[in-house]
Image (spheres, rainbow, N blue to C red):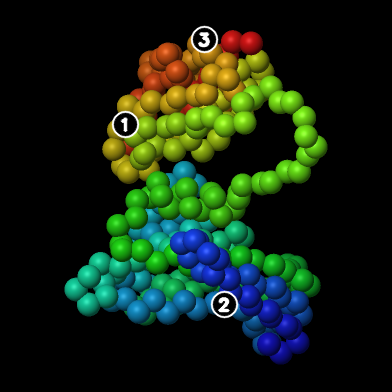
Amino acid sequence: VEESTIEVTYSLKAGAPGLEINIEADWHELGTADIGIPTLRMQFPLGMTNMTGRYETPFGSIQRQPLANQEVPSQRWVDVVGKIGNNSAGCTLLNDCKYGYSLDDTMLRATLIRSSYDPDPLPEHGKQEMKFAILPHNGKVTVAELVRGGTGFNQPLQIVSTDVHQGQFPATGNDCISCNPTNVLVTNIKKAEDEDAVIFRLQETAGKATQVKVELDGQLFGDVIGVEEVDLLERPIDNSTAKVTPKGFDVKIPANAIASVKLGLAE
């Protein structure tokens, strides 16, 4: 591409649900007031009719109709549903670092590089790497499944090598955390800022108020001895709905909302 080189690698792994795309670019295009803004996009022809797109937002998503030449933001995923003949169909595009997309009647496009020239004359100059994955489906994927897919693509399971030694936990066990029903996700776990406690952040994805049950592996976390709903600054909120259960806690989360729960754990 003019003064730049682009290398694209497609990978179809055994047992994987989709096609992975790795793009390596050595970008040297310069934008100016005279020539405009050089832009690199990738096109995904989807072969569907009556398409609509759903785009991830912070702790949510938004559905949009196709808009020719109109770019919209999205975070870790874009999901497009439509028809192939008389059958429902869909396609999810996962990404690890690109946030501008456009959808028209036949094509999904992702903006990869955009060389603006003001105020920074060299905003995208040099080597870059980006990854995508294309996952076709039957048009019936839930938002919770999309969020899980985007999270897993951006934060894959890490393998750490070590020597042989005795550990304090069993080699196998149950899930360390379970969250039900499945329209609610545990999105973050962190230490509380000002005390010896743990913060769980939950997200509701289906647009309905939900009583959610979170169960924890006692060998990993210890017993839950106290729970309290807090705001994003970890201050207690009025009318907390969080309650201790034998294996974790329950809390009521409003539709399309987030909830933060502070846990006190036994040593």
Q: Position of residue 155 (x, y in %)?
A: 61, 49
Q: Is residue 195 left or right of residue 102?
A: right
Give the Cα distance between marks 1 and 2.
Answer: 40 Å
Q: Nearer the viewer, mark 3 or mark 1?
A: 3
Kind of element beneath mark 3: strand
Q: Which residue is mark 1?
A: 210
Characterize the local packing of mark 3: few (<14), some (14-19) or many (20 or more) Cα atoms within 10 angstroms: some
Residue type indicated by callout 3? Ile
**Among all residues in the image, which is located at the extreme left?**
86
How packed mark 2 is, by other alpha carbons closer than 10 Å (few <14, some 14-19, many 20 or more), is few
Asked if one can make out residue 256 in the rendered structure from this viewpoint, the answer is: no
The disc, 1 or 2, on the residue closer to the chain's N-terminal end is 2
Q: Nearer the viewer, mark 2 or mark 3?
A: 3
**Residue 142 x/y as whole percent:** 35, 51
For the residues labelled 3 and 1, the Cα–Cα distance comes to 23 Å
Q: Which mark is residue 225?
A: 3
Indicate the secondary structure of the residue bearing disc 2: strand
Q: Amino acid at mark 1?
A: Thr
In the figure, is residue 235 to the left or right of 4? left
Q: CA distance from mark 2 to mark 3?
A: 52 Å
Mark earlier in primary sequence (2, 3): 2
For the image, the number of numbered tags is 3
Q: Residue at x 51, y 53 (%)?
A: 150
The residue identified by callout 2 is 41
| Residue 40 in view in this figure | yes
